[in-house]
Image (cartoon, helix red, strand yellow):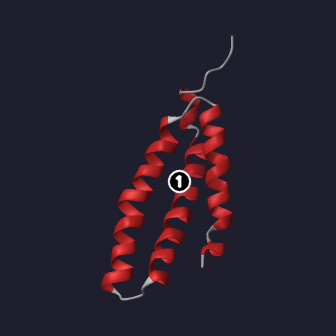
Amino acid sequence: IVALAEPLFGLSIVGTGILRSAGDASAPVWIGLFCMLAVRVPLAYLFVHGLGWGLAGAWIAMDIDLALRGLLTVGRFFSGRWKSRAEIPA
């Protein structure tokens, strides 16, 4: 189940490193917190208890979290908003 989210999770890992090295360390933290607390935990509860999917539901919730995290991180990079926080040497 998790193999489906791995490519986007890889983008998240790379994107997080890029943003941090550019001086925008807070964006990956907020993206991670949002995805964990507002996406993964509620969806896992819904899928496991509400829909009765059991452990597979928890893994599917993690897939959605990892995919969204990757998309948001890459979206932050391509938006260019990180450039205002970048430390450009003189």
Q: Look at 64% across and 47% down and name the residue there.
A: 15
Between residues 82 and 24, which one lies in front from this camera angle?
A: 24
Report x, y in % for residue 23: 58, 29
Q: Residue tagged by mark 1?
A: 72
Report x, y in % for residue 89: 68, 15
Query: What is the quadrant of residue 1 in the picture?
Result: bottom right
Between residues 54 and 82, which one lies in front from this camera angle?
A: 54
Q: Look at 66% across and 66% down and name the residue there.
A: 6
Disc 1 residue type (three-letter): Leu
Is 87 located above or below residue 46 in the figure? above
Report x, y in % for residue 83: 59, 30
Instruction: State which quarter of the image contains the C terminus.
Output: top right
Q: Look at 34% across and 74% down and name the residue there.
A: 45
**Along the horizontal axis of the image, is 82 left or right of 54?**
right
Q: Look at 52% across and 62% down and name the residue there.
A: 68
Instruction: Tell me if mark 1 has few (under 14), some (14-19) or many (20+) residues whose alpha carbon lies within 10 angstroms of its own.
Output: many
Q: Which residue ends up furthest to the top in the rendered image? A: 90
